[in-house]
Image (tube, rainbow, N blue to C red):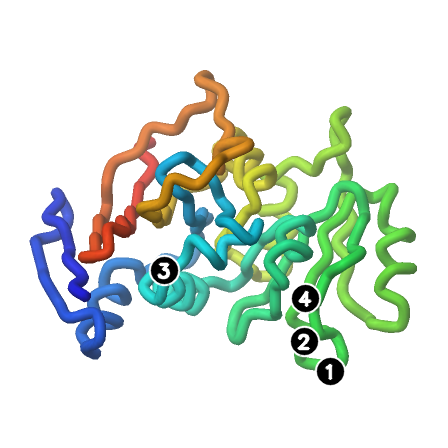
Amino acid sequence: MRLTQIATEYSTSVDVDLDASECRDLITRQYARTDATYVRLNMITSLTGSAAGTDGTSDTLTNPVDRMILGVVRSDADVVVVGAQSVRAEGYIVPRTARLAVVTSSGNLTGHQLRLDDEESIRQVLIVCAKERAEEVRRQLGSHPVEIVALASGADGRIAPQDIIDALAERALHRVVCEGGPSLASQFVQAGVIDEYCVTVAPLLEPANAPFLTIERAFRPRTEVAGHLADSAGFNYLRLRVVV
């Protein structure tokens, strides 16, 4: 299989063997960021806009290149932000380098598979919840001394994305990657806190109950293509930079 860098305003065309070491080098050059502060969105979608495949998770949409991109994006980040529903559905594990911030407005952490049986994992995880749900979250965590970040919620019961970003910044977590799911990602988009979108488009016609991003027209961000990779299996890997 071949991986091709499509020529854009910011890059020239390059073609490499997917099995060669040059593949990871190309992805690193394409996705690495060195700036001190940013908020990225990193997700995968089918051609029909579904964020999940036949098994109800992204596992049946993804491929080795997408997973390699995930690793590169995470390696530059201070923290990965993800909704509690995605933690349950995707079977999330604690990232190797970045911290993991699990967002729950409802306070429901049932069904998560996070391993919190060692000090390192406990230090890596943050639970971001509505203030009125903090005691419930603590009860569910039991004896695990995971840090709980309790924030005010709005009239709709949700926590404002900017408040989440600010709370993470107070903990010196300035390089943020949001990995969804669709509900949390859409909230981040409409709040205008994302400055770069890393989106993998899988060549699959997967039935979609809802789009992977729900955006009202008034909140549609202006973007430009900052990077574009494509492979011979039909996957496309896009970086969209927000134009201010």
Which residue is at 37% across, 47% downward? Answer: 199
Residue highlighted by disc 4: 125
Residue 17 on image: x %, y %: 15, 70
Residue 144 on image: x %, y %: 83, 72
Q: What element carries label 1?
A: loop
Cα–Cα gap, marks 4 and 1: 11 Å
Residue highlighted by disc 2: 121
Residue 183 falls left or right of residue 220? right
Residue in the foreground of this view, choosing between 243 and 18: 18
Mark 1 or mark 3: whose residue is earlier in sequence: 3
Q: Is mark 4 on a helix, strand or loop?
A: strand
Residue highlighted by disc 1: 118
Q: What residue type is labelled 1?
A: Asp
Residue in the foreground of this view, choosing between 59 and 177: 59
Q: Which amino acid does label 4 sit on?
A: Val
Which residue is at 30% across, 33% downward? Answer: 223
Q: Which amino acid does label 3 sit on?
A: Asp
Instruction: State which quarter of the image contains the N terminus.
Output: bottom left
Q: How crowded is mark 1: few (under 14 residues within 10 Å), some or many (20 or more)?
A: few
Tag 1–tag 2 contact (CB < 8 Å): yes
Count numbered badges in the picture: 4
Q: Nearer the viewer, mark 3 or mark 2?
A: 3
Q: Nearer the viewer, mark 3 or mark 4?
A: 3
Mark 3 or mark 2: whose residue is earlier in sequence: 3
Residue highlighted by disc 3: 66
Mark 4 or mark 1: whose residue is earlier in sequence: 1
Tag 2–tag 4 contact (CB < 8 Å): yes
Q: Residues within 10 Å of mark 2 (few under 14, many from 20)?
A: some
Q: What element carries label 2?
A: helix
Residue 32 falls left or right of residue 121? left
Which residue is at 90% across, 52% downward? Answer: 136
